[in-house]
Image (spheres, helix red, strand yellow):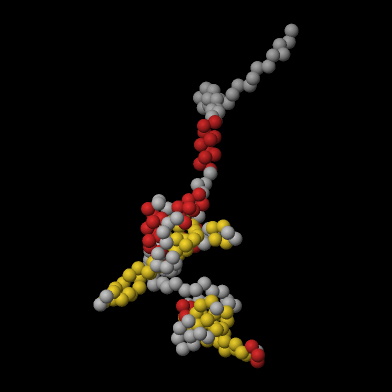
Amino acid sequence: MTDHSHTPPAGPRAAGGSSAPAPQSVGPAFGVERAASAIDVVEAPWYAVWTRSRAEKAVADQLARKDIEVFLPTIQRWSRWKDRRKRIDWPLFPGYCFARFDLTAILDVLKSAGVATVVSFDGKPAPIPHQEVAAIQRLVETELQFDPCPLLHEGDLVEVVRGPLKGVVGRLVRKGPKTKLVLSITMINRAVAVVFDAADVKKY
């Protein structure tokens, strides 16, 4: 009688003729580890904390004591100190410091003395893109000279804030270290262009 039983084929043979070891199965622990490592750690966003007048450093110190990451960029300024002048660290953006926190900690921020509010839009705290804060952090660590200036867009109406044309309003037509401003007489459809330092104008 013919034998119809089926014999499994021999496994692959390693060099030298011996059978290769059977492949090892992947246990569940290995799969969990892989999955966990694939999940990116989500960093808490940065927020702008609006402070009361001259309370920026006091707010920053309080937040740091609460283990909240805080960033208060400063710039050195000359100040009159009794009978002499002294260089002091002045907030780069007066009235603001930056804090990084999860919204579950927002009450700890708001209850800090000197805090007015957290900058919000539509009633919700507005996160700041990480790269914007990182750019300022890199800048203040350099030896470069820098000064705050208004954030303007081409086409904005702006006002001259210092110099012989202080108080004059015109339209911004070019941004840069030197700002080009157009002063117009709309009734006759004519204009003249003049160049200013960027820090000499503000949004109207």
- Residue 19, image x and y in percent? 54, 23
- Residue 136, image x and y in percent? 44, 64
Residue in front for this viewpoint, 33 or 7? 33
- Residue 49, image x and y in percent? 47, 61
Res 57 quadrant in image:
bottom left
Q: Is residue 112 left or right of residue 12?
A: left
**What's the residue at 52%, 46% (across, down)?**
40
- Residue 56, image x and y in percent? 40, 64
Q: Is residue 204 above or below residue 137?
A: below
**What's the residue at 55%, 28% (across, down)?**
25
**What's the residue at 54%, 58% (across, down)?**
125
In this orientation, does residue 105 appear?
yes
Q: Is residue 138 above or below residue 24?
A: below
Q: Is residue 105 above or below residue 185?
A: above
In this orientation, does residue 133 appear?
no
- Seen as rendered, the residue at the extreme right is 1
Q: Is residue 167 left or right of residue 61?
A: right
Res 58 quadrant in image:
bottom left
Q: Is residue 17 left or right of residue 61?
A: right
**What's the residue at 52%, 40% (across, down)?**
36
- Seen as rendered, the residue at the extreme left is 83
Q: Quadrant of the C terminus?
A: bottom right
Residue in front for this viewpoint, 86 or 13? 86
Q: Is residue 203 above or below residue 140?
A: below
Q: Is residue 112 left or right of residue 204?
A: left
